[in-house]
Image (cartoon, helix red, strand yellow):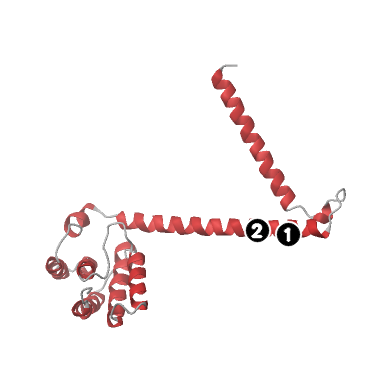
């Protein structure tokens, strides 16, 4: 037996022993005391087994919950990065607020209402960053932005008058950009009203 075969044999044996150990542990953990006639189960034994079962289930539940949260955050980030080349060229390069508003007006004239809503959303992000309300980063999601803003509102650091307008722009952007939902002219006009209500109330951080 050469070195490669010996290593492979040892790994196979270790894998088999691990599987047998896990199987034995699970069998013991979920074994019914009443089904084991050859063992004397005391009340303490039964209590320990019961506690161990519930601890196992709790750990598994928490692990699945954490895994689900991580996968959800990863999916959101992947969705945010799924941008076609046209959007990258026309929307994603850094622009001042004035250019975003001009682009929104131009796209509205072309009846690209979803693109116009996104331009308003990008203008809002620039203004929020200029005012020190948040720090815009390519990897951040709308959920993370809103979570940061909610903390500031809860602490009384920001005006609550603009909350509804900000939420409207963020939610419309999420539905149209990530959900690919069509945007009507009425929805765009509502977003325009929300933006021009929010923008004058974005006071800079002292």
Relative vertical location of residue 144 with respect to residue 152 in this rendering, above or below: above
Q: Are marks 2 and 1 in contact (CB under 8 Å)?
A: no
At x 30%, y 54%, the residue is 81
Residue 22: quarter of image: top right
Within 10 Å of disc 1 (Cα), the crowding (few <14, some 14-19, many 20+) is some
Residue 48: quarter of image: bottom right
At x 32%, y 67%, the residue is 145
At x 32%, y 60%, the residue is 140
Residue that sits furthest to the front in the current view: 206
The mark total stands at: 2
**Does residue 141 appear to the left or right of 42 in the view shown?**
left
Residue at which label 1 appears = 50
At x 59%, y 56%, the residue is 60
Relative vertical location of residue 152 with respect to residue 43 in this rendering, above or below: below
Within 10 Å of disc 2 (Cα), the crowding (few <14, some 14-19, many 20+) is few
Looking at the picture, how far across and down is residue 38, in whole percent? 87, 48
Residue that sits furthest to the top in the current view: 1
Residue at which label 2 appears = 55
**Does residue 46 appear to the left or right of 73 in the view shown?**
right
Nearer to us in this view, 74 or 126: 126
Mark closer to the chain start, 2 or 1: 1
Mark carried by residue 188: none
Question: Which image quadrant: the N terminus?
Answer: top right
- Dot 2: element: helix
Looking at the picture, how far across and down is residue 124, in whole percent? 22, 70
Looking at the picture, how far across and down is residue 199, in whole percent? 20, 76
Q: CA distance from mark 2 to mark 1?
A: 9 Å
Question: Which image quadrant: the C terminus?
Answer: bottom left
Looking at the picture, how far across and down is residue 197, in whole percent? 21, 81
Residue 78: quarter of image: bottom left
Nearer to us in this view, 125 or 178: 125
């Amino acid at each position: 037996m050469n070195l490669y075969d010996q290593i492979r044999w040892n790994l196979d044996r270790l894998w088999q022993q691990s599987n047998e150990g896990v199987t034995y542990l699970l069998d013991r953990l979920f074994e019914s005391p009443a089904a084991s006639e050859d063992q004397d189960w005391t009340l303490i034994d039964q209590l320990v087994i019961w506690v161990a079962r519930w601890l196992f289930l709790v750990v598994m539940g928490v692990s699945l919950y954490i895994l689900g949260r991580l996968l959800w955050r990863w999916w959101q980030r992947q969705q945010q990065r799924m941008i076609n080349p046209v959007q990258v060229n026309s929307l994603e390069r850094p622009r001042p607020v004035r250019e975003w508003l001009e682009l929104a007006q131009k796209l509205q004239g072309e009846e690209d209402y979803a693109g116009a809503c996104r331009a308003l959303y990008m203008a809002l992000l620039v203004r929020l960053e200029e005012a020190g309300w948040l720090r815009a980063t390519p990897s951040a999601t709308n959920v993370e932005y809103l979570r940061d803003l909610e903390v500031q509102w809860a602490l009384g650091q920001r005006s609550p008058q603009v909350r509804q307008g900000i939420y409207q722009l963020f939610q419309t952007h999420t539905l149209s950009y990530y959900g690919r939902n069509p945007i009507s002219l009425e929805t765009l006009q509502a977003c325009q009203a929300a933006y021009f209500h929010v923008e004058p109330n974005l006071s800079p951080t002292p």
